[in-house]
Amino acid sequence: MTHDILGEIRRPGGDGFDGAATIRHGRRAISIRMDRDDQPFEVTLELAAEVVRRLPELDKIAKGIAVADLRETYNNGWNEYDEVREDGSLGAVSNPQLSEAEFEAKLSLNAVNVTGGRVLDFFYDDEGMFWGHSVVVTSLNGPDLGGAHAELLG
């Protein structure tokens, strides 16, 4: 099916989502995955379209939430780790602490999950700051990100 805002919507079977689209956001291809949950698919589709229409604004807000919730976590331990050297020994690595702007600059949106008519999850690539874990900002109030929070997954 084709949607005016979302473009081509794939209705895959077996992956846990009722629909998926890929949109451009800056230079990146962003996956928009839709799970109707207990709502009609049209409700989820409408929310997904609103998210895409407002994506520059919502991405900026969600990144700010990730900075507020996770920057100190990174600066207080995730920036330091042991690395295996060529001779097999371990060497300590200590990356500098990051300012809010530096932390935010490392976040790149790569997917948004839309569930039902209210739940949004923004998934960010973090340039390896959290060693392969995903940075996710979740809103239980749709595009009103006032009560949203960030966490690490994976």
Image (tube, helix red, strand yellow):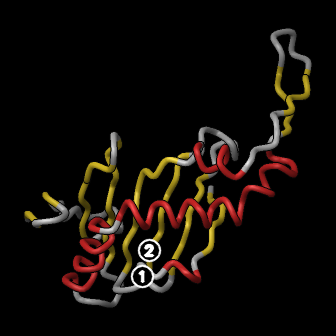
Instruction: Determine crowd level at label 2: few under 14, some 14-19, many 20+ residues with C-alpha closer than 10 A.
Output: many
Residue at horizontal 59%, vertical 53%?
Answer: 134
Answer above or below: position of 91 versus 22. above
Answer above or below: position of 97 versus 74. above
- Please state which amino acid type lies under the numbered disc 2: Leu
- Residue 128 pos. (x, y %): 64, 39
Separation of marks 2 and 1 at Cα, in angstroms:
6 Å
The number of numbered discs placed on residues in the rendered structure image is 2
- Please state which amino acid type lies under the numbered disc 1: Gly
In screen coordinates, is 108 left or right of 5? right
Mark linked to residue 142: 1
The quarter of the displayed image where residue 47 is located: bottom left
Quadrant where the N terminus lies? bottom left
In screen coordinates, is 50 left or right of 84? left
Nearer-the-camera pick, 50 or 37: 50
Q: Is mark 2 in CB contact (under 8 Å) with mark 1?
A: yes
Nearer-the-camera pick, 48 or 103: 103
Q: Secondary structure at mark 2?
A: strand
- Residue 125 pos. (x, y %): 53, 46
Q: If you read the primary sequence from the N terminus, does the residue marked by circle 2 or circle 1 appear first?
A: 2
- Residue 103 pos. (x, y %): 66, 48
Answer above or below: position of 69 versus 140. above
In screen coordinates, is 3 left or right of 113? left
Residue at horizontal 52%, vertical 53%?
Answer: 124
Quadrant where the C terminus lies? bottom right
Q: Secondary structure at mark 1?
A: loop
Q: According to the image, label 2 marks what residue? A: 120
